[in-house]
Image (spheres, rainbow, N blue to C red):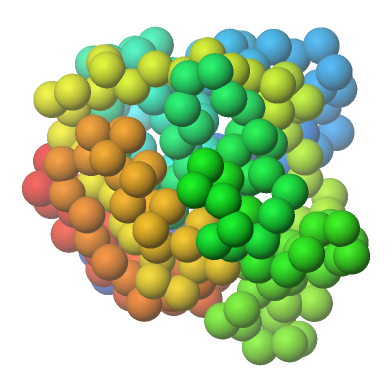
Amino acid sequence: SWVWEDTIAAMKAQSGSANRYLALDVPGCGTKRDRETSSIAFDDIAPELVADIEAAGMRDVVLVGHSQAGSTLPGMAKHRPGLFRRLIYLTCTAPEAGRTSTELMGEGLHGQSETEVGWPVDPATHTYQQRFRAMFCNDMRDVDADAFVAKLGSDMWPMSAYGQREWGYDHLAGMPSTFILCLQDMALPPAWQERFAERFLAQRIVRLDAGHQAMNTRPQGLAEILLAEADLA
């Protein structure tokens, strides 16, 4: 949830008190970093996040997900279809049925394979921190990139999320939805984002000149888009 602080502040400044905002954490991340996650099944994540929303008393929700959250938004919409009036995917991944998210990323570089997203630097010769910096921080100042990577290292999704192979998107047909495509993204190249938007059956694509962490590097611009898309719901 900590990655959303700047964008939520920007949305509050732009919209006043017209909306309520809630940043969610999957088990093992953010406010839930201390959770033991080894026994958490992937199918338990979406219901927990829905319960967090309902516990906050929120209804008629515009649900926004970023990156790996693309794996949970369809499940949340299926678990409580009447709770959400629009889904917004911010440079989200959408693995095809039968493949894990790890297999989707692969072990090569961007552009080396038609079936793998790949990495911006060679994973065989770069540490995870070096990879994360190249993937997430290409439009950050060095000092901000250092702080971001250091903080990111404390967050980890349940391991069950990386072994999941059962994905389904057909139930999203007719669901109001928007995919925000980040043009400078070095984690998910724009061509792959286009594929994922199609897989999510997104009704709209909006382009933002930002890297993968648009909520950190372009909070004002992202806030404008989110508020405009929410008004369409």
Give the x, y percent position of residue 168.
39, 17
Residue at x-position 77% and y-position 45%: 155
> Residue 111 at what x, y percent from top left?
54, 61
Residue 174 position within the rendered picture, expressed as x and y whole percent measured from the top left: 13, 25
- In this rendering, position of residue 61 left or right of residue 76: left
**Residue beneath the point at 46% across and 27% down:** 96
In percent of the image, x 69 and y 12: which residue is there? 41
Q: Is residue 104 left or right of residue 122?
A: left
Percent position of residue 209, x then y: 36, 77
Viewer-proximal residue among 76 and 202: 202
**Quadrant position of residue 172:** top left
Relative to residue 84, is residue 216 depicted above or below?
below
Residue at 69% of width from left, 72% of height from top? 134
Q: Is residue 125 left or right of residue 223?
A: right
Q: Can residue 169 be seen in this snapshot?
A: yes
Q: Is residue 9 visible?
A: no
Question: Of residues 52 and 212, which is closer to you in this image?
Answer: 212
Q: Quadrant of the C terminus?
A: top left
Relative to 104, is 166 above or below?
Answer: above
- Quadrant in the rendering for residue 99: top right
Q: Is residue 132 left or right of residue 202?
A: right
Image quarter of residue 190? bottom left
